[in-house]
Image (cartoon, coloured by chain):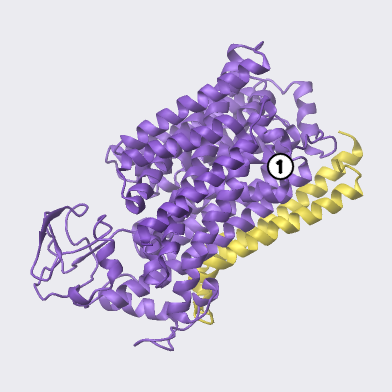
Chain colours: A yellow, B purple
Amino acid sequence: MSKEHTEYWRRNIRIMVWLLSIWFIVSYLFGIILVDVLNTIKIGGFPLGFWFAQQGSIYVFVVLIFVYCHLMKKLDHEFDVEE
Amino acid sequence: MGILGWTYVMVGLTFTLYIVVAWRSRVKDVKGFYVAGMGVPPVANGMATGADWMSAASFISMAGLISFLGYPGCYYLMGWTGGYVLLALLLAPYLRKFGKYTVPDFVGDRYYSDTARLVAAVCAIFVSFTYVAGQMRGVGIVFSRFLEVDINTGVIIGMCIVFFYAALGGMKGITWTQVCQYCVLIVAYLIPAIAISMKVTGIPIPQIGFGSTISAGPDAGKYLLDTLNIIARDLGFTEYTATFASPSTSMLNVLCITFALMVGTAGLPHVIIRFYTVPSVKAARISAGWALLFIAILYTTAPAVAAFARYNMINTLNNQSYQHAPSWFKNWQKPGLIAWVDKNADGKIQYFPGAPFAGRPDFTGQTGSFGEPLLANAPTDNKNELYVDRDIMVLANPEIGGLPAWIVGLVAAGGLAAALSTAAGLLLVVSSSISHDLYYRVLNKNATEKQRLLVGRIMIGVAVICAGYFGIHPPAFVAQVVAFAFGLAASSFFPIIVLGIFTTKTNREGCIAGMITGIVFTAVYIIQTKFLGVSNWFFGITPEGIGTIGMLLNFIVAIAVSAVTSPVPEDVRRIVENVRIPKGAGEATAH
C-alpha cells in the first residue's frame, strides 16, 4: 500500500476504535455492567441503567453510525479516495 | 364491516400492492437477480433492510417476551440493534467495495479456497433455513388467527406470494416489496402503540410515556415503572426493573447473549447481502444508518408496549370477575392465546407466578358455571388461574386500546408483511448460495447467464417448497433453532470476514480451521444443552449466548493457525488493500 493509503487506513482505524468504545460503554457498561449503580439515579420514571438498557443505547447506536458516515466522508475527501 | 371483513380488505390490498411492485421490478440478468443491479438508493435500502431484518418474531412476539422478562429483555433490544454498528463500521463498506454477489464469494476469494467457499455456502444455507421455517410458520399463524383459515392453507398462500415475487424479481423485486412492507408494518405497529400509551399515560409518544406517570385509575400520578414493580412484588413476581435475578439472567449470561445476538446479526447472510445492493461504499455506510434508524423506531417502541401491556393486563384482569372481563379477553380465548381456570371457584380471575395448568390450553367445548370455556388440561398446584400467551401483548393491543376494526386488520397485514419480507430475503440467500456459490462457482464454471438465472429461479422454488414443508410440519424444535441461527452466524462468518478485512496475515488454513472450530463448538454445545439435557456446563452460559464463546474460539484458532502455516499470496494481499480504499467501487447500474 502507498504511504497515503497506509495513513488513510490508520486514521480510519482510529475513528472506528473511538466509535466502538462509545458503543461498548453505552450498551455493555451502562446497560449491563454498571446497571445497578446507574439505577440509583432516576430520570423521570426511568431508573437510568434500565433506560440505557432498553432505550438509550439504541438511540446512541443510530447516532454513532451517522457520525461514522460523516467522519468517513471527510476522511475520504481529505485523502482523495472518494468514488 | 366487522374485524374479519376489514382484515380481508387490509391483507388483500397489501398483497395486491406487493404483486404490482414485484411485476414492475422484474429482472432479466443475474446482477439484478442477486444484487438488484447495485442500484438501490441508500434510504430505500435502509427500509428494505429494516423489513428484511424485522421478522414475525420481532413484530408479534418481542414485546410480549420483554413484558414477561422485564429488564433482561434488554438483550433482545440491544442485541438486535447493536449489531448494525458492527455492520456499518466493520463489514458493510468493505464488502460493498469487494463487490461480488454473496458472502461465500468473499470468503472463497479472500481465502483463495473452494473449500472455504463451500464451508461458507453450507453455513449460509443452514443459517437461512433454520430461520425461514419459523417465518413460514408465522405466516400460517397470522392467517389462522385473523382470517380464520386453516394454518396449512395460510402457509400455502404465503408460499405462493413469496415465490411469485422472489422468483420474478429476484433481489430487485424483493427490495422494492420490502420497502412497501416496511411502511405497512411500522404503521401497523405504531398506531396501536400510540393508542395504548395515550390510554395508560395520556402521552402520545410511547418512548416518553414509558417513563411517565399513569394518568387515571387507582395508580394515577405514580410512575408506570414504579407501579409495575409494586404490582410485581405484591403478586410474587420479580420486579419489572430488577436486574440479574435468576441464574439464566446472571450478568455474565446477559452479556454473552447480548454479544452473541449483536455479532450474529452482523454475521447473518441475508442482512449482509443487502449492502451489496447499493451503488457505492459511501451508500453502504449511510444505508446501514438508515436501516438502524428504521429498525430503532420499532425497537424503542416495543419495550414501551411491553410495559403498558403488562400494566394494563394485570390491572384489568387480576381479581376481575370473569363475567365482567373485557371483550378482548373473550375474543382471544378462542384461538387459545389466553385462558382461565377457576381453581378456587370464586368466579374471579387471579394472577400469580407459575403456569396455571400443564401445556397449552385445550378446550373441552363445554362451559363452566360462569360461562367460561372449560379446559381439559390438568391444573397445577399453585394459585395462578390465568394463562397468557406472550403474543397477545401485540395482537390484542388494538382492542385493548379501544381502536376501530380496521386497525385490527392493519395489524394482521403488518404481521404478514414482517413474516413475508424476512422469508423472501432468506429464500434469496438460500437460492444464491446454491445457484451461485455451489452451481456456478464450483460445479459449472462455464454456465451462461441464462442458465444461471434459470437455476436461481428454480432454487427459489425448491427453497420455498422446503420452507413450506417445515412450516406445515414444524419440527418440534422450531422455537429452539433461532439460537442456532444466531450462534452459528456469530461463530462462523463474523470473525472470518473481520479478519479477512483487517488483517492481511490470516490465510486459507486459518480461515477453514477457525470456521470449523467455531461452528462445531457452538453446535455441539447447543445440541448438548437443548436436546440432550446436559446442564449449561460452560460457566452457566445458556445456549443463546454460547455463540460469543464460539466466536472467540474462531478468532483465536484462525490467528494461531495462520501464524504457523504458509503466508498469504501476494495477489490476495492486493485484494485486501484494495477493499480498504473506497475509490473505484464500480459504477452503479441505475434503473
Residue B31 x, y percent position in the rendering:
69, 28
Residue B524 x, y percent position in the rendering:
39, 34
Give the quadrant of residue B23.
top right
Q: Nearer the viewer, residue B340 or B72?
A: B340
Q: Is residue B444 at least partly visible in the picture?
A: yes
Q: Residue at x 27, y 79 (%)?
A: B234
Position of B168 compared to B160: left or right? right
Quadrant for the N terminus of chain B, please.
Answer: bottom left
Q: Residue furthest front?
A: B1
Position of B331 compared to B58: left or right? left
Residue A6 x, y percent position in the rendering:
85, 40
Q: How many marks?
A: 1
Q: Residue at x 48, y 54 (%)?
A: B414
Q: Amino acid at mark 1?
A: Val
Label 1: few (<14), some or many (≥20) within 10 Å?
many
The chain to which mark 1 is attached is B
Residue B394 x, y percent position in the rendering:
40, 61
Q: Residue at x 53, y 52 (%)?
A: B80
Residue labelled with disc 1:
B40
Q: Residue at x 37, y 68 (%)?
A: B399
Determine whether B501 is above or below B456 in the image. Answer: below
Q: Nearer the viewer, residue B454 or B522?
A: B454
Quadrant for the C terminus of chain B, please.
Answer: top right
Q: Is residue B118 at least partly visible in the picture?
A: no
Determine whether B1 is above or below B49 in the image. Answer: below
Position of B160 compared to B475: left or right? right
